[in-house]
């Protein structure tokens, strides 16, 4: 098998690299260097967000790389403070300005915030539809949306999200949300793919990794991609960044996939906040 990152089709006719590089919690002063190194390794999909505070540095790294803009897939997400339609429009303009780009490949609603803004994330979504129509966002999607949130968009909006970025790892399979996405052609992007490092000491995963001569992180990332999900691990360690990229030259058989899938702990395995109750809005 060649160690080449596949592009997978979105429901709007665009494609997305299945493996990306995430910059969550990378300080702005370290972001340009980290992203530049990721691009040198071969990553062509960078995932940032307004709330991460490092969009400008992502844009700088892409420009400094010498790569054509269209060769790098860039995702960002709407800040929780800006769900009101006019606020969302201004925030999107600010994202493009920070990135110093005339378009973004994928723009997401970061959290549904059902207990904020009178529970109205539909009007926010309709603003993202505007960005898609005018071409400044090639694709649009959501993050951390539960099935009822997706069902409401299906009933009240015109565009089906291209992706839903949700917490997924061996301890939280998030299967109900993934299954809804599969039925409605919404790709799943897995954040926290190694459960913030919690799975690295798992005996089952260690056993599998030893049998394959791989690291636990490589095994888990391979499990994600064989399930058809998009994944974007985050590391500023050059060796780890390169290691995480080396997951397309081996396969897990069905029995091994099942050994990992049954590690699911349901809600007890969740590492981040629950989307139904998370209500953080930056000051």
Image (tube, rainbow, N blue to C red):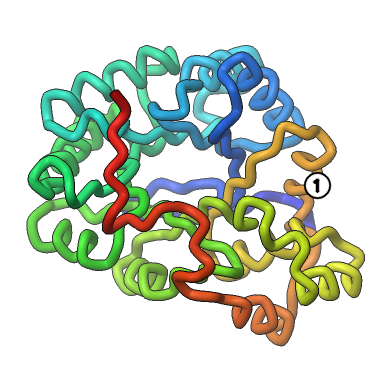
Left or right: 102 as drawn, with respect to 206: left
Residue 229 in the image: state x and y as whole percent: 52, 61
Q: In percent of the image, x 68 and y 53: which residue is there?
A: 197
Residue sitting nearer the eye, 132 or 194: 194
Q: Does residue 46 lie above or below 152 as drawn?
A: above
Q: In percent of the image, x 16 and y 61: which residue is there?
A: 154
Label 1, on which residue? 243
Q: Is mark 1 on a helix, strand or loop?
A: helix
Left or right: 201 as drawn, with respect to 178: right
Q: Does residue 9 lie above or below 148 as drawn?
A: above
Left or right: 20 as drawn, with respect to 216: left
Residue 54 in the image: state x and y as whole percent: 50, 21
Query: Could you say which quadrant of the image residue 151 lies in?
Result: bottom left
Q: Residues within 10 Å of mark 1 (few under 14, many from 20)?
A: some
Query: Could you say which quadrant of the image residue 77 lies in?
Result: top left
Query: Could you say which quadrant of the image residue 214 lies in?
Result: bottom right
Q: Locate the C terminus and report the quarter of the image it occupies.
A: top left
């Amino acid at each position: 098998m060649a160690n080449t990152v596949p592009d997978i089709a979105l429901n709007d006719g665009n494609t997305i690299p299945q493996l990306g590089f995430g910059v969550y919690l990378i300080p702005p002063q370290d972001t340009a260097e980290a992203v530049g190194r990721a691009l040198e390794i071969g990553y062509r999909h960078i995932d940032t967000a307004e709330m991460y505070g490092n969009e400008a540095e992502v844009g700088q790294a892409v420009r400094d790389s010498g790569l054509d803009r269209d060769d790098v897939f860039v995702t960002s997400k709407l800040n929780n403070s800006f769900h009101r339609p006019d606020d969302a429009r201004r925030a999107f303009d600010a994202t493009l300005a920070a990135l110093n780009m005339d378009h973004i490949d994928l723009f997401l609603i970061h959290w549904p915030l059902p207990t904020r803004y009178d529970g109205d994330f539909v009007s926010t979504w309709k603003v993202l539809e505007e960005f898609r129509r005018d071409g400044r966002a090639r694709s649009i999607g959501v993050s951390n949306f539960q099935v009822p949130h997706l069902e409401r968009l299906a009933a009240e909006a015109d565009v089906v999200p291209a992706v839903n970025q949700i917490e997924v790892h061996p301890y939280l399979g998030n299967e109900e949300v993934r299954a809804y996405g599969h039925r409605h052609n919404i790709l799943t992007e897995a954040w926290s793919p190694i459960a913030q490092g919690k799975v690295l000491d798992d005996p089952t995963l260690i056993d599998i990794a030893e049998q394959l001569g791989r690291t636990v992180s490589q095994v888990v990332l391979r499990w994600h991609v064989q399930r058809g999900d998009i994944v974007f691990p985050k590391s500023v360690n050059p060796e780890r960044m390169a290691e995480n990229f080396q997951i397309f030259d081996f396969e897990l058989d069905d029995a091994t996939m099942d050994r990992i899938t049954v590690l699911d702990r349901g809600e007890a395995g969740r590492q981040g906040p629950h989307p139904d109750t998370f209500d953080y809005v930056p000051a």
